[in-house]
Image (tube, grey):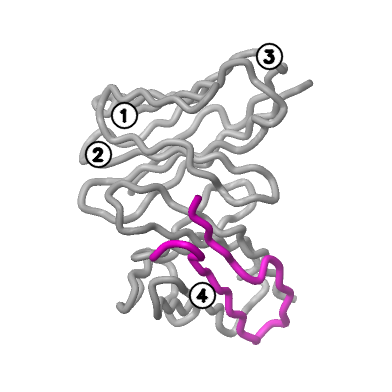
Amino acid sequence: ILNVEQSPQSLHVQEGDSTNFTCSFPSSNFYALHWYRWETAKSPEALFVMTLNGDEKKKGRISATLNTKEGYSYLYIKGSQPEDSATYLCAFIIQGAQKLVFGQGTRLTINP
Amino acid sequence: GAVVSQHPSRVICKSGTSVKIECRSLDFQATTMFWYRQFPKQSLMLMATSNEGSKATYEQGVEKDKFLINHASLTLSTLTVTSAHPEDSSFYICSAIGRQHNSPLHFGNGTRLTVT
């Protein structure tokens, strides 16, 4: 059974502060790791698709790193804004399989 | 960006009836579509993977006769919940992926099903 763990489950951050959270996944047979942002009443939106160990991707104030050897990815948000409030999901794809296995998500709330 | 339309967004039905949920990729060809279910405070649980023109692959524990999936074209997949029971009440969401290697998923808005 593939286990994808995200921590923390929820997080409250003051506007302007930076924050980060973790996605842990099996380190064997890695193929790809996805990050999604899911705002209330909207559909999940893709942030990053990461495939190589040491990958670092950036989109505006959000960035992500990937360590496939130890099985974790970090998502960083710099200078949090209220519009960053959402659930952030990571999903893992094992080599040879077509499907994504999702973590439980980290629910981020930015306090103005 | 790529758009996936899921319909209906909310449905209430009586026990014993069947409900069909549609998932359409509006501006790209979805070679594969995934159907997920979300229980309260839990992650998205993959129910099945469907490839255009072939039978869906169901995850362990998902009854294929209860959750009928059809992926008749490159832009449409349907999930039919047959003989619905109150325990089928849940949030169902579809996602689609195109042909491009390592492309992200594009999600529908989800369907909130309530069975009374």
* 2 and 3 marks in contact (CB < 8 Å): no
Mark 3 Cα-neighbour bin, 10 Å: few <14, some 14–19, many ≥20: some
The residue pinned by badge 4 equals B79
Subunit of mark 4? B
The residue pinned by badge 1 equals A71
Q: Is residue A24 left or right of residue B109?
A: left
Label 4 element class: strand
| Mark 2 / mark 1, whichever is N-terminal | 2
Subunit of mark 2? A
The residue pinned by badge 3 equals A16
Kindly report which numbered mark, 3 or 4, lies closer to the viewer in this rendering. Answer: 3
Q: CA distance from mark 2 to mark 1?
A: 9 Å
Q: CA distance from mark 3 to mark 4?
A: 43 Å
| Mark 2 / mark 3, whichever is N-terminal | 3
Residue lying at 55% horizontally and 36% vertically, measured from the top left: A88
Identify the amino acid type marked 4. Answer: Leu
Q: Measuring from the top left, give residue A4's x and y in whole percent.
A: 41, 39
* 3 and 1 marks in contact (CB < 8 Å): no
**Residue under disc 3 on the same chain as residue under disc 4:** no
The residue pinned by badge 2 equals A30
Label 2 element class: strand
Identify the amino acid type marked 3. Answer: Gly
